[in-house]
Amino acid sequence: MLHTVNKSPYQSDALTTCFGLAQPGSAVLLIEDGVYGAMDKTKFSAAVEIAQQCCTIYVLEPDLQARGIDSDRIMNAIHTINYDGFVSLVEANPVVQAW
């Protein structure tokens, strides 16, 4: 299953709720303001590290760029993808849950 999170973790519980309900083997894609959850050394970093034990976490690079976030500020284990990568995730995961 692919989970997409588009809300900032600073304004919504969507990211932590997603992590709490995602099953092992799930993919989580941070898009729009959800990309703030991918940043290293924030109060959400520990939750992201725990979630990475069961899920693969991705962040959409064009949304990082639109918010002026350099890729070197993203946690190491998070995969940065472009729109083609987004399409590939949707193709590989026919069930998508938006948060």
Image (cartoon, grey):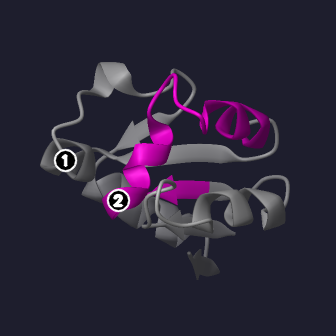
Mark 2 sits on what residue? 33
Q: Residue at x 15, y 38 (%)?
A: 68
Q: Kindly identify the amino acid type of the residue bearing the numbered disc 2.
A: Asp
Q: Kindly identify the amino acid type of the residue bearing the numbered disc 1.
A: Arg
Q: Quarter holding the N terminus? A: bottom right
Q: Residue at x 40, y 46 (%)?
A: 36
Residue 19, image quadrant: bottom right
Work out whether mark 2 precedes mark 1 in sequence or the reverse, and give the earlier one.
2
- Residue nearest the observer in this picture, 25 or 39: 39
Q: Is residue 58 left or right of residue 83?
A: right
Q: Residue at x 60, y 39 (%)?
A: 44
Is 86 a magenta residue? Answer: no
Residue 46: mark: none
Structural crowding at the residue carrying mark 2, measured as other residues with C-alpha within 10 Å and reported as few (<14), some (14–19) or many (≥20): some
Residue 15 location in percent, x, y? 61, 59
Residue range of the region highlighted in magenta in the rendering: 28-51
Q: Quarter holding the C terminus? A: bottom right
Mark 1 sits on what residue? 67
Residue 75 location in percent, x, y? 50, 25
Q: Is residue 22 left or right of residue 39?
A: right
User: Gap in Å between the C-alphas at discs 2 and 1?
Assistant: 8 Å
Q: Residue at x 27, y 44 (%)?
A: 61
Residue 49 location in percent, x, y? 70, 31
Q: Are marks 2 and 1 in contact (CB under 8 Å)?
A: yes
Is 35 a magenta residue? Answer: yes
- Residue nearest the observer in this picture, 74 or 60: 74
